[in-house]
Amino acid sequence: MTASIAAAVRELASAEVVAFAGVGLAARILPVTEAYRTVEATLPEGADDARPHIAWLLANGSPAGKAYAATLLATFDPEAARAAWGSLSHEAAEFTTFHGCIMDRTTLGQYATGQLTVA
């Protein structure tokens, strides 16, 4: 289980896009979405195995990778996720988001702030 989590986290570490479902008219599932789902499927039961990988992603990932890390953290430790979103709320780096066919650009700080208002 840990090897598949590690491989998925490596994929998320270089993510340039945040998409939790299919994108575009064809609803294509992106490799980063598959990687996210791989880690998410182990949670919350596999939180002990996943936590160090998620912490590494939060510290070392791309801006989109950090967004994925904080989102994953929220599935088993909402308090830690809230702290992560707070620490990311001042980040100026940008990434692309997809919501179905709608593509947008945002900063990690804007995305994190939005997550704090939802949480």
Image (cartoon, grey):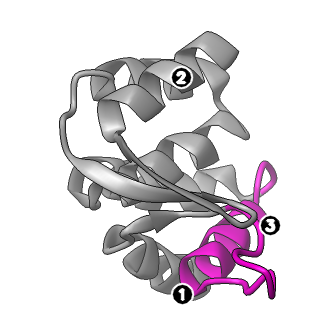
Q: Is residue 70 above or below residue 13?
A: above
- Label 3 secondary element: loop
For the residues labelled 3 and 2, say whether their Cβ atoms are less than 8 Å apart.
no
Kindly identify the residue that appears in the image at 53 percent across and 22 percent down.
114
> Main SS type for the magenta part?
loop
Mark 3–mark 2 Cα distance, whole angstroms, equals: 24 Å
Residues in magenta, as a range? 20-45
Q: Which mark is residue 50?
A: none
The N terminus is located in which quarter?
A: bottom right
Q: Nearer the viewer, mark 1 or mark 3?
A: 3
Which tag, 1 or 2, sits closer to the chain's start? Answer: 1
Q: Which mark is residue 114?
A: 2
Q: Nearer the viewer, mark 3 or mark 2?
A: 2
Place of residue 39 in the rendered image (x, y in percent of width and height, measured from the top left): 65, 68
Q: Is residue 102 visible?
A: yes
Looking at the rendered structure, the kind of residue marked 1 is Ala
Q: Which mark is residue 41?
A: 3
Q: Is residue 76 above or below residue 99?
A: above
- Disc 1: which residue: 3
Q: Is residue 36 above or below residue 75?
A: below
Looking at the rendered structure, the kind of residue marked 2 is Gly
